[in-house]
Image (spheres, grey):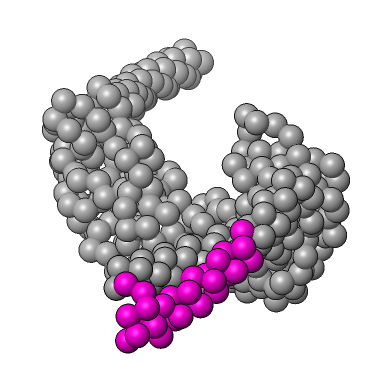
Amino acid sequence: MISYIKKNIFVIITCAIGVYLVLEIALRIFNFKELKKETLKAAIPTVSVLNPLPPSPTETISLPGTLKAWYEAPIYAQVSGYVKVWYKDYGSNVKKGDVLAEIQAPALDAEFQQAKADYESQVAKYQLADVTANRYLSLQKTNAVSDQAISVAVADKNSEKAKLVSAKKNLQKYDAMINFKKIIAPYNGILTQRNINVGDYINKDGNISDTKEITNLFTVSEIHKMRLFVSVPSSFSYLLKKGLTAEVIIAQFPENTYKAEFLTISKGFDPNTQTVLAEFVMENKDYKIWPGSYATVNFTAPIKKDLLTISASALIFNEKGIQVALLTDENKIHFKNVKINKIIDSDVEIIEGINPSDKVINNPRTSFLEGDLVRVVKPRDGY
């Protein structure tokens, strides 16, 4: 009996060991297949894809700009002399006709007095010639004087009359120059420059105590409005049209936003920078904004474009041109040439080559070849 039980126990243990070994072998085979599967899967390159998106319905750009006065008049001397006195300083409000400074010009004063004396002398000579000619003409019928003498008297009268006109014009010239001894404001505005001091020698060539440098005496600026000048890249020039409004931020007043209306453009590109000069106008009724200020100009305009945008990181540059790598339905790579409109920050506008339904591979490897099998790890819309 005992031997029978031992025999059965031995058989049961043997069977259990056999079952264990079978299960162990089966498990190892299963793990090997899974491992092989995982290894094959890991060998396939992974990619992320993005879908092309339509561009924003508006275009916004930010550019630097410079503010200038609506009118700006640098005033130069028209006569030579010494500064006698100046009446207006930097920042002064001036009215049209205000005297800004006076110039002492002794040589000019002497020339004016000489011209005045020459004119008075010529008046007397003409009056004598006129009386003589009239007297000779009155004696013509009596034959008391010859016709030749009468002709000479009349000619002398006409000659003296011409000299009188010349002397009068010369006097008027010096009279006008005398008026230039006073420097006058041409219009209402602000005095933004004063480059003279009492005693400075100035001349009509624009020199102030220095024969090598041409300098204006004053600058008067009319700033009830301001001109804003912006150099706009050629790729954005289509935005510049009547009705465009720009938002302006000025460095001195970063908390304020001003409005500027588009006025005109230069209608010609700078060949060195490929920019066009655009002019805007800003109201400045409180005279708060000063000419020469630096500004940041932001303008937004509606656009309508038949194109798509993708991330610039999806582009491939090679001997075939500019391409993108597309993901096919079989998860294979297909290269396609594209045409770029322009680059905006990290995005590019594509004119042709892709469709909205295409799956564009982002950051494609340089080792990818046409038809390579890939695996998408993180598909996403947009970028």
* Residue at x-position 16% and y-position 25%: 319
- As drawn, is 145 to the left or to the right of 161? left
Magenta stretch bounds:
118-146
* Residue at x-position 14% and y-position 30%: 320
Which residue reaches farthest top? 3
Q: Position of residue 352 (x, y in %)?
A: 17, 52
Q: Is residue 134 covered in magenta?
A: yes
Q: Where is residue 63 in the image (x, y as percent from the top left)?
A: 51, 52
Q: Of helix, strand and loop, which mostly describes the magenta segment?
A: helix
Q: Which of 325 and 333 is in front in this view?
A: 325
Q: Where is residue 271 in the image (x, y as percent from the top left)?
A: 32, 40
Q: Can the viewer see residue 244?
A: no
The count of marks equals 0
Q: Is residue 282 above or below residue 341?
A: below
Q: In which quarter of the image is residue 123?
A: bottom right
Q: Is residue 349 covered in magenta?
A: no
* Residue at x-position 55% and y-position 53%: 65
- As drawn, is 85 to the left or to the right of 164? right
Q: In which quarter of the image is residue 260?
A: bottom right
Q: Which of 96 and 366 is in front in this view?
A: 96
Q: Nearer the viewer, residue 147 or 213?
A: 147
* Residue at x-position 81% and y-position 63%: 92
Q: Which of 374 and 96 is in front in this view?
A: 96
Q: Position of residue 185 (x, y in %)?
A: 70, 65
